[in-house]
Amino acid sequence: MLLPANHAKRVLPRQWWPWFHFFTRRVPSHWWHQVSDRRYFWLTGMPDQIAYRKNLVRYELGNGCFAETYWAEVPASEGMIARAGPAAFLVVHGSEIAKFDCYGPEGHYHLAAPYPYGPRKALQGSLHFMERTAEEQVERAIFELQHNSVHYLKTHARRKVRRTRLDPQLLAAVCSEMRTNMLGDLGAFRNQMINEADTR
């Protein structure tokens, strides 16, 4: 996942990268919540992975909060795809709270929650799904968003996020729509793979 801190690395000359790593390894862990903040995109620029996403759907949750689903692809060499699957975001007041990458065996998610409930570096780190199939991971992602998002908000580094309360009924309706779209994207991708295999 490309975040503003990584974007800064991209725009720095390569000979400066060791110094970049020297400082980022020494940044206090709670500062990493700031690099998951989309409010800074005006300064760092929006990463291509955020700007150009397939089948992007945004779901408004009110009061500056929204969720997103889209089809994520991680490219490999020579135009091949290393892994692909449906993905989901929860964004509250510009801060990325959770991201779920349902890639199947390589599926994982990112939580902007303090250790031990999440990685020490917010969305910079990842947690692997216990579920092994993409469909099961979609169900887990929806469960986390619907039932545990309140906890993620309460433990966030930003006071404004901690004070935010999502409407449970609206959240449930949005999660249901997100599940439908994510499973629909997964089914369409698999049908495409079958059709391409048949034409070879």
Image: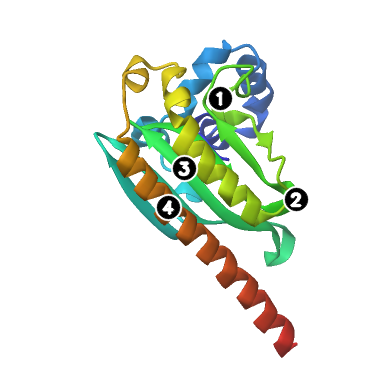
**Disc 2 marks which amino acid?**
Pro
Contact between marks 1 and 4 (CB within 8 A): the answer is: no
Q: Nearer the viewer, mark 2 or mark 4?
A: 4
Q: CA distance from mark 4 to mark 3?
A: 14 Å
Q: CA distance from mark 2 to mark 3?
A: 20 Å
| 2 on left or right of 167 | right
Q: Position of residue 134 (x, y in %)?
A: 65, 55
Q: CA distance from mark 1 to mark 4?
A: 26 Å
**Disc 4 marks which amino acid?**
Ser
Picture disc at residue 176: 4
Say whether disc 1 or disc 2 marks the residue closer to the N-terminus: 2
Q: Nearer the viewer, mark 1 or mark 2?
A: 2
Q: Position of residue 85 (x, y in %)?
A: 61, 57
**Disc 1 marks which amino acid?**
Ala
Q: Position of residue 193 (x, y in %)?
A: 67, 75
Residue under the point 64% across and 51% down = 136
- For residue 73, say whether it is visible: no
| 194 on left or right of 172 | right
Residue with the most extreme left position: 63
At numbered mark 3, what does the secondary structure look like: helix, strand or loop? Answer: strand
- For residue 185, say whether it is visible: yes
**Mark 3 lies on residue:** 89
At numbered mark 1, what does the secondary structure look like: helix, strand or loop? Answer: helix
Nearest to the observer: residue 4 or residue 158 = 158
Residue with the most extreme bottom position: 199
**Mark 2 lies on residue:** 105
Nearest to the observer: residue 32 or residue 143 = 143
